[in-house]
Amino acid sequence: MSTAVSHEMPAAPAAGREVVLDASGVIMRFGGLTAVDNVSMKVHDGEIVGLIGPNGAGKTTFFNCLTGMYIPTEGTVRLRGEVLPPKPSKVVKAGMARTFQNIRLFGNMTALENVMVGRYCRTSSMALTSIIRGPKFRREEEATRARAQELLDYVGLGKSAELLARNMPYGDQRRLEIARALATDPQVLLLDEPTAGMNPKETEEAMHLIFKIRDSGLAVIVIEHDMRFIFTLCDRVLCLVRGALLIEGSPQEVQSDPRVIEAYIGGDESQEEGE
Amino acid sequence: MSNDLMTPDLDDTVEPGPSYPQFGTPMVLAGSVLVAASAFLSWSYDREPLGDVSITGNPAPTQYLALIIGVLGIVLFLGRGPLARFFSWFDETAALRGLGFGAVAFALAVILAIFANTSGLINVDPGGWILLVGSIALAFGAEQLPAGRTHADPLRSKTSSWTEILAIIALLTGVLFLAAYALAMEDGYAFLALLAFLGAISATLIRGGFFQWLSIATAKHRQVLMLGAVVVAFLFPFTQDGRDANMTIATQIIVFAITALGLNIVVGLAGLLDLGYIAFLGAGAYVSALLSGSATSHLGFQLPFWLTAIIGACVASTLGLIIGTPTLRVSGDYLAIVTLAFGEIFRITVNNLDGINGPSITNGPNGVSGIPELNLFGFDFGQPHTLGGFTLTRYANYYFLLLLLGAFVILVFTRLNNSRIGRGWVAIREDERAAEAMGVNVFGLKLFAFAGGAFLAGLAGTIKAHQDLAISPDQFVFLESAFLLAAIVLGGMGTVAGALVGATMLKLLPEKLRFLENYRLLMFGILLVLMMRFRPEGLVASKRRQLEFHEDDQELAEAIQVEHLETKEAQA
């Protein structure tokens, strides 16, 4: 269904592709509760990996472990072989960007300013430079603005640059969040339910946008409840249940695995797919 | 009035029409005429109140204010009909309502002045009552007026550039004369009446949409505004011509305003609550006092001023770093408590470094006195100078120096605000976790705001020490920190104008309203409570701050959106 997008069949890690993200044995405990139990995953360049599981399976917690918002109790997360520092802003600088399940834009800033905030970690002008306003400052500020506008165009919000984020329609806010994350020049993009609350048309657009991002060479990790979305989009799918990794494989394998169906439909938590 | 095209938008807002529309027109007219006419009548039997308002036919200065209100009322009323072509975007009906309320406040202030000065309402002459009745009629009538024609949006009005520049110049000139006039007032009650009058005029202009128009105009002619403000501030000492009384107040206001601006970086931009900010001013002042060869300094050596200024500011910002490093990791309330404690620690420490309780450095409660006058490049700040026939006293000398520092602080404030760092601060205020997750160095930026604000306060303190010639610990009490914070809350968080307006109000009002004596704090308390209820973002708030305080007001958000787009267009 995706037009002009090379949607390869993955299964085996594509040969020649480098591992960009390598999480091994990640355990996250809160007191007696083990929210993430020994989950390992490898993500390669230009790959879309889906993360599914019923509510409360620990998907978002795992995301937080990857992005430095939580420090895993055990296990390590490596980006291109380097262990990630335990601080979100440094993780971003290392090349990992994310969006949030419940949109967390800076509502009272314009769309352009939101994206410019994303450029923060790739720019360097500090106090004195800002006060003196020499040519270097102006060049950097100009470049930041240009790049932000370029990213807004990229996600299709070029005309909304001067709108306050809070005044934007819901679907646009989701796309703006992606633009803001892309502004940090990431190598891995983590999307937490990017289509939650979207109508089918918006979902379709979001899918094309994610393919476009993948084709530019980024690795993308997606948490999603919309199964149709996950199975058309992802090269590989991981299913978490109660914090532990249940199965990892191609969308087809995961889809047909009885344990996955069991986890979603059976058991005491009768979760339907969807939000 | 002719083409009353209501847009569907306006229909949505269910606004009950006035109950007695037939009274609107006559009452507004009669009220305005009565208020204007009362200016020529005797207001008080006694000569004492308001600089003699007891003469019929020869208005006193305060009575001219009534005349202005009355005439303004008539002009605005005519704007509904015959003069409509001069009011393309100015909503004269809304403005009349603002004027009405202001007029009542003014009349009440006048009656109060006569009552308090002569101990009895019996001394209010018919003129005074006519003023009150007229203003009430004006207020009531304006409320009953049916809504006028639909006005153009002030934001989209296209006025010629020179009109806008003239308006800015007129406004600034008005400010200069007003400052000179208000400062020359001896009588607290007359000042109160003037305040009520200014309130009436501001209410008129705000309701009419003038300030919306002005915000676009100033955005378009930023340079004119800047230049004008500098000229006005520079000219002010010349209106005083050798008199010291007002220059002392003016210099105090500037020191206070500079400190408030520094605090506004911390509170308004970075969103950190600092309750001990005065300690940084104190640190700068003490360092400067002790190192400048004061007669009572125990250090016994003298450094040039530029060096003590830098050392003072650096000491202050080091203290900021020491306080900030452990506390900025925790959330707001803890920081407030720690800074509050720090302010007290500073005061108690300098109190105890007196040679008895601790090492002998600061003379304890006696403070450091005999601080020498500044002398920069052979210019002695202690001596009066003449310039073009005007005498400039020592206070005027310090005024100019402080003005320079003020300009520097404003420059730092605005440039930081409009930079990568400023964007980071806004992001932190909006959503700290999201900012962190977008790569903003939250802790570093907070610490920088804290230390930077302290640096500016320390710098102001070094000049303050020389200007006051003596400093003591009781100048740096908690109440001063609270006042600084109140100035920002009152004036508007995150704006230069807000800090300046707030600082001026908080320093000027206590000077002029001395008759309130012990009730001054009560008055400020009430004022702040009212502000929190009706305008939590402050008098001159930045648009963003305004939105932050009205999170669920979608109408406001859209209005500000339009204004933002217009400003962008105007600047382009």
Image (cartoon, rainbow, N blue to C red):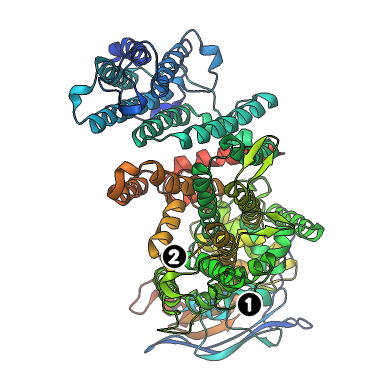
Q: Nearer the viewer, residue B296 or B233?
A: B296
- Would residue B442 be visible to someone looking at this image? no
Please state if A89 lies on the left or on the right of B204 as rendered.
Answer: right
User: Which chain is mark 1 on?
Assistant: A
* Mark 1 secondary-structure assignment: helix
Q: Which mark is residue B476?
A: 2
At which x and y percent is residue A210? 65, 63
Marks 1 and 2: in contact by CB < 8 Å?
A: no
Tell me the amino acid under the disc marked 2.
Answer: Phe
Query: Which dot, 2 or 1, sits closer to the camera?
Result: 2
Q: Residues within 10 Å of mark 1 (few under 14, many from 20)?
A: many
Figure check: B195 above or below B246: above
Figure check: A157 above or below B335: above
User: Which chain is mark 2 on?
Assistant: B
* Residue hosting label 1: A90
Q: Residues within 10 Å of mark 2 (few under 14, many from 20)?
A: many
Q: Kindly indicate whether the residues beneath marks 2 and 1 are on one polypeptide chain.
A: no
- Would residue A93 be visible to someone looking at this image? yes
At which x and y percent is residue A235? 65, 74
* Residue that lies at the very extreme toward the top in this rendered image: B82
At which x and y percent is residue B223? 70, 39
Image quadrant holding the C terminus of chain B, namely top right
Residue B356, quarter of the rendered image:
bottom left
